[in-house]
Amino acid sequence: MAALVVALAATVLPASAQGNDPVEPAEPVDVADRPSILLVVGAPEGGLLGMIAGANFAEQQLAEALADHGAVRTVADEQLTAADLVGADVLVITAATDSANFQPFLFKATVPIVAMKPANWNALGLAKRNADESTPLQLLDAVQPDLDHPIASRLDPGAGADVPLFSGGPFRVGRGWVSGSEPTGDAVADVVAAGPDGAALIAYEPGDVLGWPYIDASDTAAACRVAFPSHSSSWALLSTAGLALFNGAIDWTLGDACAVPAGPTTPSLHNGLCLTEAANEDEIARNGELVPREILDEPNLSSLWVRAIEFAEIDDEPIVFFGGRFRTAFDADADRDDAGALVGGLDRHGVFGCNVSTGMVTALNAPILIDPLTPVGDGVKNERVRALAFDGTWLYIGGKFAIDTDSLDDETLAALPEGLRRTTISLIRVDPRTGELDLSWRPNIRGSVSALTIHDGWLYAGGGIRLADEQPVTRLIRLSIADGADGITDPDFAPEIAADVAVGGTDPFAAVLALEVVDDTLYAGGSFQTVDGQPRNSIAAFDLTSGELTEFAPSLGDNNVGTDPIAQIKDIAVMNDGSILACGDWWLVSPTPNRTWTAYDHDGGAADPNGDGWFGQRSKIQPRPNQFNHGKFDPVTGAAVMVDGAPWGPVTDGGIQACAVDPQTGIVILGGHYESIGSYEPTFEPADQNDYPESHVAYEKLTAVDGVTGEILRWDTDIDSIRGLDAVAVIPGQETTGSEIIVGGAMTVADRMAHEGIARYIIEN
């Protein structure tokens, strides 16, 4: 809901209402345009009319003071959304707000905030938790200001050591930092005023260590923050000196100290997109049944997750399609039961459409079946939808699933080709509005489809494809999608993609997992060692005018012996400078000096890399913080782009499953299974598998990176997921609107709010 704009008189309350002398009108802030100030209020008795009539004196007092600074927009706390923050220069949260309605996304907001209630201080990480009774709220009437701080600049020059804060006080207000964990060093917030029991007015600049780092010790203020002492009672008015400090706080948040740093804007979470079933954290698939998880169980890969995202304009409406392993989809405004679980969903096996404008599930309902259990070998045939593509008319769906014949009418069932009657199929195309099958397009392929892309009348499909039209193929094919095409594979495009690893049989790891076309070049990534007999480290390129393999050959390697001994490319994107961005799971980018790894034998002790146990089944290399897992490469040669002697971009402690680039800002979005990300440190020697260099931050599962410098943008999304993210897409914006980021995986929470399977972020222009 948009913020409700309220016209406010520029006069202050009479002295009889304030209990002290009238306040001289504040001088307007000297800015070219009047700032936009968002005032978050509690819902007053009598509604808005009651507030304007003076039923809520304290909030009206603040609103009138703010009117001297800029244009004031007012929104009730229970109606506040992330969209209300767009365009705001400062956000003021009054003390009359209900802490139960305090929005978690404000913790990461890049808008300066003045918070005026202990519970709000807590939610922003500015002060100690209310529930901790060892440090009671201060009983405060007067404060001792730091007259040298800019916030105190409006105080009377003759103000003494003790300045009265309220009319009619004292009142109980918030506390200072957590006892015993006060921050030290340069990144320390300023105590602007102190009460008898500690800090009472605190000013945080961007990057200052938060007073209560309740998520992670590295949590810092995302923008300027002011913990301003106040009270929830509507009649707790500020004194003349209190108003001077309040106006000084607004001056400060609108000044240079709180200016947005130069550089790309970090994305902000946006509500209003459809949801899937939540990841199942309490059960695990065992022997064909879902049973309660036990404490020693491996991470639950029976969780339902989103694996593929495709955006399209359908009938002038923006529609995003999701594919994966789920059987239910929910509208953005879906109801929840008493336990918070989603209720009232629509049956949607493996794929559904969501209207980006309304957040409503579309009518698309493809007749496919998805089994929710964890695949073990060939134990589960109908695993998931892995890839989606849209050609302007048809939606192509790839993966491993079955046709739900029970949902077809008799006429459609009679016309169903033999290739779609199998217990497991890999590729279909449907009407994007309804999900109705196109029975005239009949691909006959065996093996899972993991990647799809469209170019010049052809659909390119990659995966573990073994047979096409009953003829052997090796992982990558193309099929005509021109008018009248019947789904027959093009025999003239038949690259030989192979791996030769002496574990598990013939071609155990050969697969194509990612496809991207740039001009007339097809880039293919996956898990392989040769293409057409030429060495290629899991990524290659083809000239589509000739069908020939190009010289593009990045040098990648992997030390994870016994698990995945060759590199894996999971996603490919093109960057704004034309470079190729590849993401996946690998350790080495050549040339990379002084690579770091650690090996452990089956008992957990250090293994000798030169000994007999190095390649044994009982030894493995633990994931290390210096895994690269993504890289930026020359589009012709495949040479790695280097920055200061090291490959471009940060390193992670786990795999990256998906990546995308915002064409407007050049920001790179990484999504995956990692838990930390940081700069490459070639001399770092880990003491054990849980040791991390100081350069790493806990920006797990989703990270924004500067596309030029490779520097990590300060954007902590707090994705909560057992598995992680598997899909990332960017919807380009227009000249006046920012791009949108859509991510999918097995998550349940983003930015501390429930977002089952899917989250949406906005990159502001």
Image (cartoon, rainbow, N blue to C red):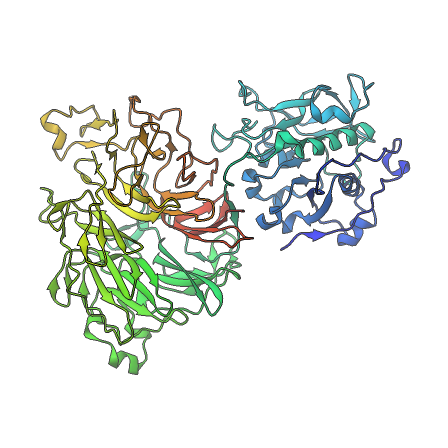
Residue occupying the far top of the picture? 161
- Vertically, is 673 above or below 133? below
Residue toward you, 284 or 543? 543
Q: x%, y% of residue 155?
A: 79, 24
- Vertically, is 509 above or below 475? above
Residue 28 located left or right of residue 426: right
Residue 652 located left or right of residue 335: left
Marker count (numbered): 0
Which residue does the image show at 28% across and 69% down from the upper left?
A: 481
Q: Is residue 265 visible?
A: yes
Which residue does the image show at 57% across and 32% down from the upper left?
A: 125
Residue occupying the far bottom of the picture? 411
Q: Is residue 625 visible?
A: no
Q: x%, y% of residue 692?
A: 35, 26
Which residue does the image show at 43% across and 44% down from the upper left?
A: 666
Residue toward you, 287 or 460? 460
